[in-house]
Image (cartoon, rainbow, N blue to C red):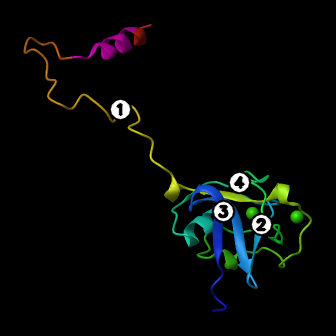
């Protein structure tokens, strides 16, 4: 049980994005954004099974948490399998306030964009008229004529 340290991402759009909170001695606390970067976020995302890290926002992007502020000056290499393996100072020792609460956005929780362009259309038997004209491709002609300049 010494090995298990609970972490979570609070107040985000899903469980893979939010304010970083760590449990220590039965109490959840936040992490200061001093030195907070993508390498730190990577480890959080990995431990949570949330894929790669997309961003490591600071300044309480996901709101201010409750005391205590557990950790400060976190320095992960980015290759650790768990957040507890990072170099991150002593519990409760910090020079921060909650306006500096660290956040993480992981790729795993991202909602995929709705059919971003290029994914859609063109596929469905819109095969032209048999005289060398393809169907419904006016946009393509506009594109070519503009490219000629
Ligand atoms: Ca600090
Ligand atoms: Ca760091």
Which portion, as a residue range, is magenta?
136-145
Tell me the quadrant of the picture where the C terminus can be found: top left
Helix, strand or loop for the magenta stretch, by majority: helix
Which residue has dot 1 on it? 118
First of labels 3, 4 by sequence position? 3
Looking at the image, residue 69 lies above or below residue 130: below
Alpha carbon of mark 4 to alpha carbon of mark 1: how far? 33 Å
- Residue at 67% of width from left, 91% of height from top? 2
Q: Residues within 10 Å of mark 1 (few under 14, many from 20)?
A: few
Ligand 1 quadrant assignment: bottom right
First of labels 4, 2 by sequence position? 2
| Mark 2 touches mark 3? (CB < 8 Å) | no
- Residue at 84% of width from left, 55% of height from top? 99
Label 1 sits on a secondary structure element that is: loop
Which residue has dot 3 on it? 10
Residue nearer the viewer, 9 or 52: 9
């Amino acid at each position: 049980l010494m090995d298990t340290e609970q972490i979570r991402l609070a107040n985000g759009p899903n469980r893979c994005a939010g304010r970083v909170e760590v449990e220590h001695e039965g109490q959840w606390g936040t992490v200061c954004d001093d030195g907070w970067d993508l390498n730190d976020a990577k480890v959080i995302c990995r431990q949570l099974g949330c894929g790669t890290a997309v961003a490591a926002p600071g300044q309480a992007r996901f709101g201010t948490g409750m005391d205590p502020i557990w950790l400060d000056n976190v320095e992960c290499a980015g290759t650790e399998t768990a957040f507890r393996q990072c170099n991150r100072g002593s519990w409760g020792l910090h020079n921060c306030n909650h306006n500096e609460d660290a956040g993480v956005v992981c790729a795993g929780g991202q909602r995929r964009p709705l059919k971003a362009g290029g994914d859609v259309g063109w596929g469905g038997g819109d095969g032209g008229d048999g005289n060398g004209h393809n169907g419904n491709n006016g946009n393509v002609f506009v594109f070519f004529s503009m490219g000629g300049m």
